[in-house]
Image (spheres, grey):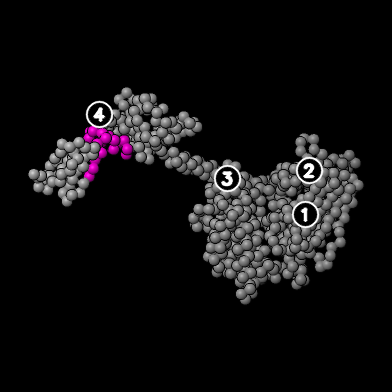
Amino acid sequence: MPLPHCQASPARSLHYCGANYVQDSAPRTHNRLLRPGGLERTIPETEPPRARPAASLRLIIQRLPDGIVIVDREGNIRFANPAAERLFGRGADDLMGTPFGFPLTAGETTEIEIVQRRGGGVVHAELRVVDADWEEEQVELVSLRDITDRKQAEERTQQLGVEREARLEAEAANRAKSEFLAIMSHELRTPLNAVLGYSELIELGLSGPLTDKMREQIGRIRISAKHLLALVNDILDLAKVEAGRLSVSSGPASASGTIAAAIALIQPQAAAGGLKLTVAPVAEPAPIYLGDDERVRQIIVNLLSNSVKFTDPGGKVGVELAATESPDKAARLQPNRTYVSFRISDTGSGIAEEKLQSIFDPFVQAESGHSRAREGSGLGLTISRRLARLMGGDLTVNSEMGKGSTFTLWLPADLAARDAGVKPTIASETVTLESYVTGLSRVGRVLLDDMQGTIDEVVGRIRYDPALSVAAGLQVSQLTDHLPTLLSDIAGAMVMIEELKGQPSPLLADATEIQRLVSERHGTQRHTLGWSESDLRREFMIVREEVERVIRDASKSGVELPVEDGIAVIGRFLDQSEYVAVRTLNAARKS
C-alpha cells in the first residue's frame, strides 16, 4: 500500500513522501522528483550527480563576457572560455597545456598586456586571481577583463594634456614674438628713416658739393635703405595679421582716386623699365568701395610693382576698374552682393599653374632659388590677400606661362554712397562716416533680440548638413560652443559703431579683441572635436546666411534698417572671426 501523499510510477523513480524521497526499483531513464501537490521535476540521468555542479560552472564560465582561464599548480592552462580565446587571439585547443606566462597570486588584481598571435595587436587586460576547485583539483581561476578602450582613453587624455601645455607654450611664444616685433618696429624703422633722410640731405648738396661718383653711391644707399624698410614693414604687417591684431578702417572710398595715387608712385619705376602703363576709362558713376583707402593703395602698389618687376622692357601693364554682381568663382566672397574689381594685368613671364596658389603663402615666390632674377621677401601677396579679406574682399590670380598674369582685387561696393552722392576718400582725404553708420545700432538690436532663434537655426542646420557629418552625435552645447558670445559681441559692436559715429574707440577695440579671443577658442574646440578647415568654413557660411536672414526678415516685417550696410559690417566681423578660428585650428593640427 503506498505511503500517504506519495505518487507511484511504473518507471523507476523517486517519490516525495513527506520529507523523504523513495526510489522505486523499476528500470528508468530519468529521475523524476514529485513535489507536494503533484508537481513533477525530471532530472536527466546522463551524468553522475557529483558532476552536475562542475558542468553548471563550466556552462556559466563559457558564457561570461570576461576572459576566464583555469591555470593548474604548474602554471599551465587547463581551460579557456571563448572570451579568453578572443583576448589571446588563439583557440582553446591551442591554449590548452601552454604556460600562462604571468605570475599568479590569489586575490591579486593587476594590469597586463597581451600580444595577440593573430594580427600582432596589443590588448590591455585587468587580471584577477582566485583559488578554485576544478575537476577535483586545486587551480587558479584567472579573470581577464579587456580594458583596452579605457587605457586608450587615458592615453588620449594624457596626450591632450601634453598638447594643451604645448599649445599654451606656443601661444605664449607667439605673444612674445608679437611684443618683440612691436618693440622692434620703432627700433628698426627709426634708424632706417634716419639713413634715408640723411642720404637725401647729402644728395641735395646741403653738406657740400658732390662728385658724380659720390652722388651715385649715395643713391645706392638710399635705394638699399628703402628696400630694407619695405622688408621690415612687410614682416611687421604679416606678424600683426597672423596675430589677428592688424586693424583696418572701413569707409566709402573712390576707386579712381586710389588707382591715381598708386599710379603716381609706380610711374617712375615703369618708365625706368621701358613699360607702357595704362588705365582703362572708367564708366560713370565711378565705383565707390568700402574699405581702408590706405591699405587698398598698399595692395594696388604691391600688385603694380610686381607687374613692373616681372615684365620685360617694351611690355605693358594695365589697370581696369569695374563694378559687378558676378565676381570670379575663385574669389571667396559673399553671394548676392556688388563688388568693385581692380584688375592689374601685364605681359610678363607669367606663373606656372602649380604655383598659382602657393604664391600667396608667406616667403614663397614664383621664382625660387639663389639665382632668381628679382628681389623680394615673398610677403607682398600674402599680406595683400589677407588685407583684402579683412576688408570683406579677396585677391585672385589668373596666369599663363609666357603670356602674363592678371591679379584682381575684389572689395565690397558702396552703392548707397554712390547713389547718395556721398563724398568718398580720395588719396587719403578724410570724409565723414555718419551717413554710412546710421542705423547700425538697430541692426545690432535686431540681432540681439533674435539671438536664441538664430542659434537654434544654426545648430539645426549644422546637425543635419550632409557636408558636416563630423557634427553627428554632438550635443547642443558642443555645437553652439562660443557662438552666443561671438554674436552678442558683434551686435554690441554694431551699436557702438553708430554711437561713436564710426570713429576709433577703446571700447570698440575691446570688442574686437573679445571677438578674436572667442574665435581662437572656437578654433581650438573644433580641432579637439576632429573638425577640418572645410568643416569650420562651412559652419561660418551657415552662420552668415542665418544672420543675413534675420536682418532681412526684420526689414520685411517693417523695421527700418540699413540692410546692406548692416550685413556688410557683420560680414566683415565674421570674416575676421573665421580667419582667426581657421588659423588657430590649422596651428593646432600642426602642433
Of marks 3 and 4, the one in the foreground:
4
Q: Earlier in the sequence, mark 2 or mark 3?
A: 2
Q: Identify the element where label 2 is drawn.
A: loop
Q: Which residue is disc 2 drawn over?
A: 352
The residue under label 3 is which amino acid type? Answer: Ala
Of marks 4 and 1, the one in the foreground:
4
Q: Earlier in the sequence, mark 2 or mark 1?
A: 2
Compared across the picture, whether 99 is left or right of 469 comes to left
Which residue ends up furthest to the front in the rendered image? 10
Q: Nearer the viewer, residue 334 or 43?
A: 43
**Residue 507: image location, x then y, percent:** 59, 62
Q: Residues within 10 Å of mark 1 (few under 14, many from 20)?
A: many
Residue pictured at 77% horizontal, 35% vertical: 370
Q: Nearer the viewer, residue 422 or 500?
A: 422
**Residue 156: image location, x then y, percent:** 48, 41
Picture quarter with the C terminus: top right
Give the number of the disc on residue 588. Answer: 3
The residue under label 4 is which amino acid type? Answer: Glu
Compared across the picture, whether 145 is left or right of 236 comes to left
**Residue 135: image location, x then y, percent:** 27, 29
Compared across the picture, whether 121 is left or right of 82 comes to right
Of marks 2 and 3, the one in the foreground:
2
The residue under label 2 is which amino acid type? Answer: Ala
Q: Which residue is disc 4 drawn over?
A: 136
Q: Which residue is disc 1 drawn over?
A: 408
Q: Identify the element where label 4 is drawn.
A: loop
Q: Residues within 10 Å of mark 4 (few under 14, many from 20)?
A: few
Compared across the picture, whether 196 is left or right of 589 comes to right
Q: Earlier in the sequence, mark 4 or mark 1?
A: 4
Say if the magenta span includes residue 530: no
- In this rendering, the answer to whether 310 lies above or below 473 is above
Say if the magenta span includes residue 50: yes
